Image (tube, rainbow, N blue to C red):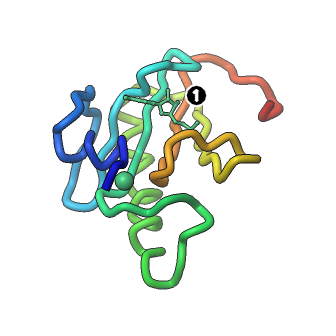
Amino acid sequence: MDCLFCKIIAGEIPSTKVYEDELVYAFEDINPQAPVHVLVIPKTHIASAADITGENSALVAHIFEVIPGIAKKLGLKNGFRVVTNCGDDGAQTVKHLHFHIMGGRPLQGQMG
Ligand code: 5GP
Ligand code: ZN
C-alpha cells in the first residue's frame, strides 16, 4: 500500500520515535506547529476517523490510553492538545489515522 505512515512504521522512511508498542507508533512531526508536536498512529492502516468502527475502536481506545504517558514523557505538564484531521474539509493530508499531540506553549483557543 502506498501509504507514507505505513512506510514510517515499516522503517522505510526515517522518523524520530517517541513511543512504540505492539499496536501504536508515535513520532515527531516533520513540520512542528508547536514546541512539542508528535503524531500517534495505529500500526494497522486505518484511513481516517471516518473509518473507525466497532471492529477497530479498541485500537483507538488504546491510543488514548497511551497518550497520557507520552505527554508525560514529553514534559507536557501544563496540558496539551489532541487533534485528528479527517478528510478534505478536515485538512487531512496523510490518509492514515493519526492523532496530533501539540503543546509546550499556550495554544490558541480556536482550531483555525
Ligand atoms: P494532517 O494534515 O494529515 O492532519 O497531518 C499530517 C502531518 O504529517 C503534518 O503535520 C505533517 O507535517 C506530517 N508529516 C508529513 N510527512 C511527514 C513525514 O515524512 N515525516 C513526519 N515525521 N511527519 C510528516
Ligand atoms: Zn497506512
The image quadrant where one finds the N terminus is bottom left
Q: Quadrant of the C terminus?
A: top right
The answer to whether residue 40 is above or below residue 108 is: below
Q: Residue at x 49, y 19 (%)?
A: 31
Establish if 77 lies above or below 87: above
Q: Where's residue 27, x and y in %?
A: 33, 34
Q: Can you identify the residue that label 1 sits on? A: 78
Percent across and percent down for residue 39 are 43, 38
Q: Nearer the viewer, residue 13 or 63?
A: 13
**Residue at (27% x, 39% y) in the render:** 8
Decide if ligand 1 comes within 8 Å of the CB at mark 1.
Answer: no
Q: Nearer the viewer, residue 68 or 38?
A: 38
Residue 12: x and y in percent read: 18, 37
Q: What is the quadrant of residue 46 in the picture? A: bottom left
In the picture as drawn, the residue positioned furthest to the bottom comes out as: 54
**Frontmost residue, 78 versus 106:** 106
Q: Residue at x 60, y 48 (%)?
A: 84
Left or right placement of residue 20 versus residue 39 in this view:
left
Residue extending furthest front? 2
Element class at badge 1: loop
Establish if 104 lies above or below 40.
Answer: above
User: What count of labels does the image hold?
Assistant: 1
